[in-house]
Image (cartoon, rainbow, N blue to C red):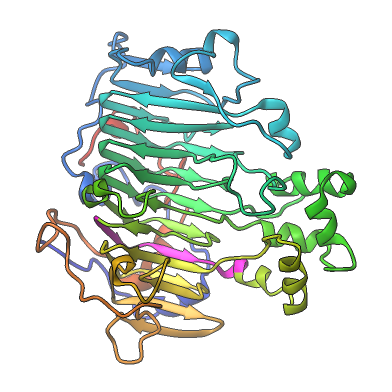
Amino acid sequence: MKRTVRSLCSTALALTLGFTLLSAPAGVQAAGNADYNLTGFSQGNTGGGVISESNTAVYKKVYNATDLALALKKNSGVKVVEIMNDLNLGWNEIPSAAQTSPFAKHNDALTHPVLKQTGVSKITVDGFNGLTIFSANGSKIKHAAISVKRSSNVIIRNLEFDELWEWDESTKGDYDKNDWDYITLEESSGVWIDHCTFNKAYDGLVDSKKGTSGVTISWSAFKGDDGSPNSWVTRQINEMEANKASYPMYNYLRSSAVGLSKEDIIAISGSQKKGHLVGATSLESANANLSITLHHNVYKDIQDRMPRLRGGNAHAYNIIMDATDARAAQARITSGMAAAIASKGYKFGITSNGAISTESGAVLVEKSVIKDVQYPVRNNQTDPTNATYTGKISVADTIYSLDGSSFRGSSDTAGSPLAPVPAAIKPFSWNGFSTLPYSYQLDDPSTLNARLTASNGAGAGKLSWSKDNWLKTSY
């Protein structure tokens, strides 16, 4: 297995710990750069192939929901779907011609003023073998959840996903009703998600379950809400502030019994609760097949699950977990406030977990950056005294900082803050193989912030490429 460190920079460690936003010259990461080759567990995935857009029988340009419904209908024979522009895909805002399989009505919105009008759709991509969905311009998909089922060789690239969160009064802040994930992978093999952006969602961002294998998520950005005057969260809070009596939980948080301001609630609500759940059902036999690679991703103010693995194997390298703003927001809740909130059965706060391995799963985190995550490495989420629920997890040469203190090292370094908690440590080994079945290159973690947050870094709309480059898997 080939593993090399591309570059070292003697001053970049300080820059990384400060998370200064640096920009690289335009065109540095150009077509032909092998940095963007498909690697990881999805290696060998061909997607729909490199097909000319003139082949309209299998290459479909999508301008609206009706186009998308036709392209993604089961047995359509389509191999490439190019999203030409932003798409608003809520159930109430798509035409009746699109209100058919693969579209279905999702759970009704209950609180967000926009989603109550637009509705939410579920789009099921079922039974495809060889499919690429991409945008050349970083188009945005809103008000919809995508479920990939019983499919193989699927590629999703250069798309942004947005506006799929609302305040949760119905389960008192437990976020256990709507089941809105941007992308869910089920009973599938060979899925590559690359150069995408995922904004705050009600549930997870990209989940993989029911034995899905061969997943790679690369060069993507996952982020919470920024709390700006017209942000998605701010619009929700403004609606409740004007109608407090209609929202008992919100009204209680704003009352003298708790004492949170509107600005406090916006800040605390901003971060995203969940990243990647890999294996949805505890001790399910299919979990042994789970495999996922995460590389060159930025997780900005994600509270948990980067990833959270049940069985199987997960490999994360050259990723950034930056929870700085989430940690600052959590400090707005005093111990007295927390007690008052809990006394009414409400859940309003911020979880602070990083990578999690459970149920004998194997997670390796290499040469990454973890900032202001209280519990960066966990190995049991159910019962620390029961080894059945404990996973294997190892961290190598990673930069970790918390409240200004910093550490660079591995999980087995003496006194390491990256040692797994809370259960007794299981020695690390992969499940089903002794070494990773693919080659990959490693960047020095001290260079990651500059690299991944640059104008051509992780996320949708960062690369100006010809269309055929988005259809390739190597350069």
Residue 449 visible: no
Q: In this rendering, would 61 be left or right of 443?
A: right
Q: In this rendering, would 364 be left or right of 86?
A: left
Q: Position of residue 422 (x, y in %)?
A: 40, 78
Q: Residue at x 50, y 45 (%)?
A: 198
Q: Position of residue 26 (x, y in %)?
A: 42, 49
Q: Position of residue 314 (x, y in %)?
A: 27, 57
Q: Quadrant of the N terminus?
A: bottom left
Query: Is 440 located above or below residue 194 in the figure?
Result: below
Span shown in magenta: 312-326
Q: Quadrant of the C terminus?
A: top left
> Foreground residue, 84 or 21?
84
Residue 467 visible: yes
Q: Residue furthest front?
A: 386
Q: Position of residue 358 (x, y in %)?
A: 33, 64
Query: Is 266 located above or below residue 27 in the figure?
Result: below
Q: Residue at x 54, y 53 (%)?
A: 223
